[in-house]
Amino acid sequence: MRLGYAYAFGCALLLGAANPAWAAGCKPGDASLAGHYYLRGVMEVGSELLLRKDGSFEFMLAYGANDQYGKGCWVKKGSTVEVIPAGRGSASTHHTPDDSGFSGLVLTISGRSLVWDINGSGHKGRFEK
């Protein structure tokens, strides 16, 4: 599979090329959940999620010609992780790879993975470290 420019650029950002100084408003996250995750189990979708210990995140997703990017804060709430984009008060429970922008994610903690039930459809992907 050939990687597009936006996907490669997103990967570079997730690997630390960006300065996380914008994350000053985030509260420190659960250190055991912090890390670099890759989406598995969703056909034709490439996605990465970087959860930092300081409570900030970066997200990218590539699906066909549709690319998404987001950054903001993440928080553990019970058995879920909410990935909340900057400028929003909460994460969307209805976000899909088809959306034109990034509205956040609510992921279920499952061992060392974070499970994304896409738009409550029962179709699930796993973000794995």
Image (spheres, rainbow, N blue to C red):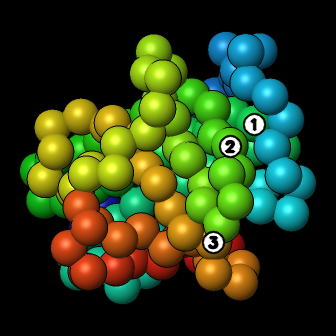
Of the pair 126 and 11, the residue shown nearer to us:
126
Marks 3 and 1 sit apart, C-alpha to C-alpha, by 16 Å
Mark 3 or 1, nearer chain start: 1
Residue 21: tell me if it is visible: no
Residue under the point 67% across and 52% down: 77
Instruction: Give the residue pinned by disc 3.
Output: 109
- Going by the numbered disc 1, the residue's amino acid type is Gly
- The kind of secondary structure element at disc 3 is strand
Mark 3 and mark 2 lie on one chain; the one further toward the N terminus is: 2
Q: Do labels 1 and 2 touch, CB within 8 Å?
A: yes
At 66% across and 66% down in the image, what residue appears?
Answer: 79
Crowding at mark 2 (Cα within 10 Å: few <14, some 14-19, many 20+): many
Mark 1: secondary structure? loop
**Circle 3 or circle 1, nearest the eye:** 3
Residue 84: x %, y % from top left: 51, 35
Between the residue at mark 3 and the residue at mark 2, the CA separation in whole angstroms equals 12 Å
Dot 3 surroundings within 10 Å: few (below 14), some, or many (20 or more)? some
Name the residue rendered at 63%, 72% in the picture: 109
Q: Which mark is residue 27?
A: none
Q: Quadrant of the C terminus?
A: bottom right
Vertical position of residue 108 compared to residue 123: above or below = above
User: In the shown orientation, is residue 80 left or right of residue 55?
Assistant: left
First in sequence, mark 1 or 2: give its number: 1
At a point 16% along the width and 45% down the height, the residue shown is 99
| Residue 109 higher or lower than 11, as above or below | below
Which residue in the protein does label 1 denote?
55
**Badge 3 vs badge 2, beta-carbon distance below 8 Å:** no
Task: Check disc 2 and report its element: helix, strand or loop.
Answer: strand
Q: Position of residue 35 (x, y in %)?
A: 74, 59
The disc labelled 2 sits on which kind of residue? Val
Residue in front for this viewpoint, 28 or 89: 89
- In three-dimensional space, the C-alpha distance between marks 1 and 2, rounded to whole angstroms, equals 7 Å
